[in-house]
Image (cartoon, helix red, strand yellow):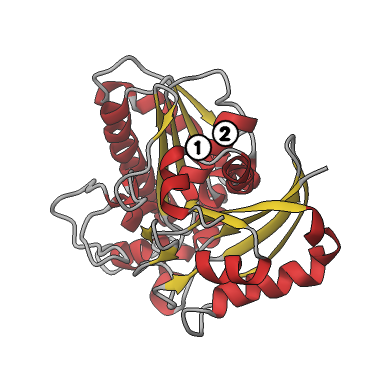
Amino acid sequence: MDLYLVVDIGATYTRIGIGDENKLLDKIRFQTPRVGDEYTIVNKIIDYSKRFYSKYFDRIKAIGVGTIGPLDVEKGRVINTPNLPIRSFEILDPLIEYFNKQVYVLNDAVAGVYGEKVFGIGRNYENIVYVTLSTGVGGGVIVDNNLLIGKQGNAHEIGHIVVKYDSQLTCGCGGRGHWEAYAGGLNIPRLAKHLAENTVLNNSSLWKRVLENEITSIDVFNYYRNGDLFAKQIVKEIIEACIAGLATTINLYDPDIVILSGSIFLNNIDVLYEPLIKNIDKHIVTSKPLIKPSSLGEDAVLYGALALALNPPLKIIKLQKRF
């Protein structure tokens, strides 16, 4: 039986797995390196693959990779990513050189929508939008059963939709008022700091903590669940940005279904999901699509990488095929 090595390179974690034509069979996770050169990340992928999956190497037919972007899709490398200190790094050629197998690389959110189409909740729909709220904000889109990729593999960088044009908040890319500046896990602490410096809430434990110490997005949502007033203000800003970004995306692509994923969303469905569903209608001009949590959860990109290895789109074959 043929097997496929699959990789999900995120800004916080990298996941590696083994799958067959039907499902993911095993997976591991490690922290994505934040210090090194353009080969550090791919070398760690090779190292962990050898450590955990070397017994399968002779059965691997192809390798699929979903990665943070932006991409140079023809060269299969990441260029100037805003969410890692290692801004640009190699993927495609070093993996081909080591494994001597065909490797295909897609943007992680594009891989995510492909995974949902082939293996998940999107299989019965022709028009799908996949949105991930994680370290950053990203999107993948299928229109009339066609996976949209873009000239360099960077279609639907929806995290850089401007949701507040007069905002002083800076995204990791340097732009102001982007969706990712409000709802990306890396940027939520910056949002909290910005709001704290322009607010006085002496009865908020979180407000005092933000002014004195570093916090994480996890802290914000935990304080929210405990009724903290400042946390409620932060989450209100996050939800408003998500409504604006999601409505714009729906108006652009007219999907049958929107699939929401990513660690920020999946770990906080109880906080984010209902307000999005209830308040988005008045901002969209098309008929309201289904809006559902990912059926594949944190494995959506790995399943997308599996779908990619099994059946790569013609454009990806044309640009990346080496054998």
Residue at numbered disc 1: 113
Q: Is residue 283 visible?
A: yes
- Residue occupying the point 34% across, 51% down: 154
Q: Tell me: residue 284, above or below residue 315.
A: above
Q: Are marks 2 and 1 in contact (CB under 8 Å)?
A: yes
Question: Along the line of sight, which residue is nearer the eye, 318 or 246?
Answer: 318
In this rendering, the answer to whether 127 lies above or below 74 is above
Query: Taking 105 as reference, is 288 left or right?
Result: left
Looking at the figure, which quarter contains the N terminus?
A: top right
Q: Nearer the viewer, residue 245 or 56?
A: 56
Dot 2 surroundings within 10 Å: few (below 14), some, or many (20 or more)? Answer: many
Look at 60% across and 71% down and name the residue there.
97
Where disc 1 sits, the SS reads helix
Name the residue: 53% across, 48% down: 262
Work out which residue is located at the far front of the displayed protein and give it.
323
Location of mark 2 (residue)? 116
User: Residue 217 — which label?
Assistant: none
Residue at image location 74% in from the left, 38% down from the top: 23
Residue 115: which quarter of the image? Answer: top right
Q: Secondary structure at mark 2?
A: helix
Q: Is residue 143 left or right of residue 269?
A: left
Residue type for callout 1: Val
Q: How many residues crowd around disc 1 within 10 Å: few (fewer than 14), some, or many (20 or more)?
A: many
Check the image and name the residue furthest to the top.
287
| Residue 133 in sight from this viewpoint | no
The percent position of residue 85, horizontal first and vertical second, equals 43, 78
**Residue that protrudes farthest toward the left in the picture:** 166
Quadrant where the image shows the C terminus: bottom right
